[in-house]
Amino acid sequence: MLASSSLSKITYIVYHGTDCISAKKIMQTNFIYKRRSNHWLGNGIYFFEDYKQAKWWSEIISKKQKLLAAIIEVKLEVESDKILDLRETSAMLMFLDRANRILEGISKNDKEPISTDKHKLMCIVCDYYKIEYNIDLIIKNFSKDYKSSFLNLDTTKKNVMQLLGLNYQEVQYCVSSNQIIKNKKIIYEDGDDMYV
C-alpha cells in the first residue's frame, strides 16, 4: 500500500483479487458489488493492502469457478473526512460511540430483534455509518492466527507461531463509491503470469 496526501485527499494503492472474466468486465465498466448481509465492513468493493493476499484470494475465487485468477491494482483517491480507518485508536473510539447509537436506534425502530451474528451486525452498523457520516472508505486490520491458509505454514512454523501467540495482520479496504477508484489495471493473470 502506498499512501500519500495532497491537501485533503489521501491516495492508496490497493489490490482486488478476482477471476479473469470478472476482471475484464471490471476493466470495461466498473466495479459492481453484490449486496450481502454479512460483509465484515459493510457492503462495498473489497481490496487488500498486500498484493500477495489479493493473489491468494483470487486463486481461491477462481479455483471455485474453474477460471484463471486475476488481480486488479487500483489507485484510491479519497477526501480524508470520508475515510474511517479503524486501525487508528481515535477513529475506533469514535466509531464505537457512533455504532452504539446506531444499534440503539435500530433496536428502537425495529420490531424484529437485532441479529446476534457479529458479521451481520458489523455489516448493518457499517452500512448505516457510511450513509450517516458520508464515508466512502473503511479500512480495518484483521488479525489471523497460525491456521490461516494464506500463510501456508509448515508444522514447525505453525507450532512456533502458536507457542509465541503470534498473528499476522491482513488489511482490507471497503470502498462504497466507484468515484474514488482511479487508474485500475490488471497486473496478474494466473496461468501466464501476465503483468500489465
Image (cartoon, rainbow, N blue to C red):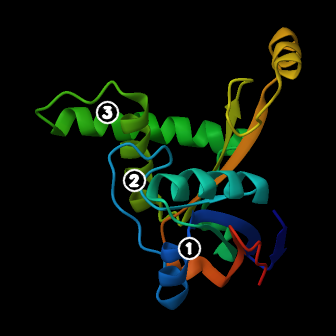
Residue at image mark 2: 127
The structure residue drawn at horizontal position 26% and vertical position 39%, both measured from the top left corner, is 106
Front label number (1 vs 2): 1
Amino acid type of the residue that numbered disc 3 sits on in the rendered structure: Glu
Direction top: furthest residue: 163
The structure residue drawn at horizontal position 68% and vertical position 31%, both measured from the top left corner, is 148
The answer to whether the residues at label 2 and label 3 have Cβ atoms under 8 Å apart is no
Amino acid type of the residue that numbered disc 2 sits on in the rendered structure: Asp
Q: Is residue 49 above or below residue 120?
A: below
Please give the label number shown on residue 104: 3
Sequence-earlier tag: 3 or 1:
1
Q: Residues within 10 Å of mark 3 (few under 14, many from 20)?
A: few
Q: Position of residue 59 (x, y in %)?
A: 62, 55
Task: Give the alpha-carbon distance from disc 2 to disc 3, as whole Å.
Answer: 15 Å
Front label number (2 vs 3): 2
Left or right: 17 as drawn, with respect to 61: right
Residue at image mark 1: 20
Q: Residues within 10 Å of mark 2 (few under 14, many from 20)?
A: some
Sequence-earlier tag: 1 or 2:
1
The structure residue drawn at horizontal position 46% and vertical position 61%, both measured from the top left corner, is 44
Q: Quadrant of the N terminus?
A: bottom right
Task: Give the alpha-carbon distance from disc 3 to disc 1, as whole Å.
Answer: 43 Å
Q: Is residue 164 above or below residue 55?
A: above
Q: Is residue 61 above or below residue 122?
A: below
Direction bottom: furthest residue: 28
Considering the numbered disc 1 on the image, is that residue within a helix, a strand or a loop?
helix
Left or right: 10 as drawn, with respect to 101: right
Quadrant of residue 131 within the rendered picture:
bottom left
Q: Is residue 52 above or below residue 24?
A: above
